[in-house]
Image (tube, rainbow, N blue to C red):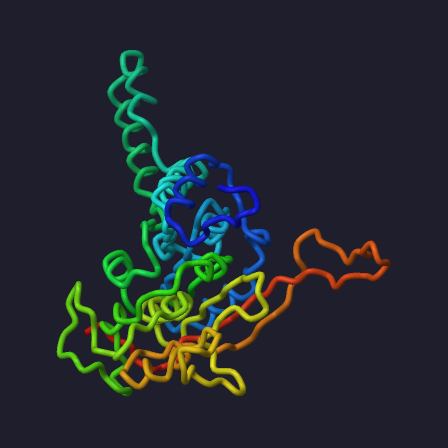
Amino acid sequence: MESGKPPAFGAQEYWESRFRENTDPYDWLQPATILDKDITEALMLSDDPGPQILHVGSGTSLLSFHLRSHVDDPGQIQNVDYSSEAIKWGQQREREIFNFQLDEDDFESEEEDQDEEEVEELRKNAMLVGEIPMMRWSQTSLLSLPSVITTCQLGAFSVIVDKSLCDAIACSENIDASLYFGLYCPTGKAPALSTVKEGDEGPSLGQTHRVHPLHVLGLNLALLARTGARWIALSYSEQRFPFLHGKGYQPRTSEGQFDNSLPKALLDQGFPDPGKLWFQIRKDAVNADGEQCKKGEDGVFRPEPKHWIYVLERTPVELRVR
């Protein structure tokens, strides 16, 4: 990385290299427990007797393992990450922490000194330990519709936990909107195609539209969420989600506008609006861990740094894959 140049947070190669070279646990922005209150509330509100949790951008965070304390069955949790290195790290770390399996060598070397009954008992115990359920882990690109569809169960999740993934996604390149005409809302304007196959360019828009990656993240997570599901996100940004329809929201009416809203021409063509799929329940400020209000060189006190917890809820508006 060139000196003074920010990390390529939107690039898969960056994350593969980072997690390959540094295998120490690392939690972005805040400790693993920072979202506990909101996760507990979301699980209590779910009408699913075995609510599933999707942890997006699991990385090397200890949050993955802390989430097990929120559920009866670790199989209710799916950890996903862009990096195969992060997924391998998480799976191995889970085995180490929770001691899921005994190696055959642990008892084979002693078989000569043990009677048959003892050996059989040891084997049974090893099998029982190995059958304790683990969390689910998958390498998933959350900005790729085919990747999301093939690695995650659609409409299954009651809670989505996002500990600064949204910040990394925001650093990605804008995405060709035509790739997302495979999604549509039945109650809205449908794309002018009967089917959209891999490699199709989608309806002719007269010009190529590229959309902010957080719009795409909002669509893909809406596809995975149950109605009423909570998306709980920690971010360093006070204005993180460009699709939220706050007061005065207007889609872009010209390509010359410099903002991250969706182009009106794109919405008119039937592109699904993530702002109709999620609404914000609340946004809470939390003190940046360990940072205090400090006096600058000019003698003026600077505001205490803040991080932000967003709680979004999945609306009843249906989203389908064509």
117 vs 199, left or right, is: right
316 and 241: which is toward the camera = 241
Residue located at (48% from left, 75% from top): 259
322 and 64: which is toward the camera = 322
- The answer, for residue 49, to whether it is visible in the render is no
Q: Position of residue 105 (x, y in %)?
A: 31, 21
Spot the residue most to the top.
113
228 and 107: which is toward the camera = 228
Spot the residue most to the left.
194
Residue located at (37% from left, 84% from top): 264
In this view, 61 is above or below 250: above
In this view, 166 is above or below 282: above
Check the picture and name the quadrant holding the C terminus: bottom left
Spot the residue most to the right.
299
Spot the residue most to the front.
256
298 vs 33, left or right, is: right
Residue located at (28% from left, 29% from top): 123
Q: Position of residue 42 (x, y in %)?
A: 47, 69
Q: Please tell me in which quadrant of the rendered image residue 283 appears.
A: bottom right
308 vs 53, left or right, is: right
Q: Please tell me in which quadrant of the rendered image residue 109 appears.
A: top left
Q: Position of residue 227 (x, y in %)?
A: 36, 76
Residue located at (23% from left, 84% from top): 190
Q: Please tell me in which quadrant of the rendered image residue 122 appears.
A: top left
- The answer, for residue 157, to whether it is visible in the render is yes
Q: Position of residue 215 (x, y in %)?
A: 39, 71
Number of numbered discs overlaid on the protein picture: 0
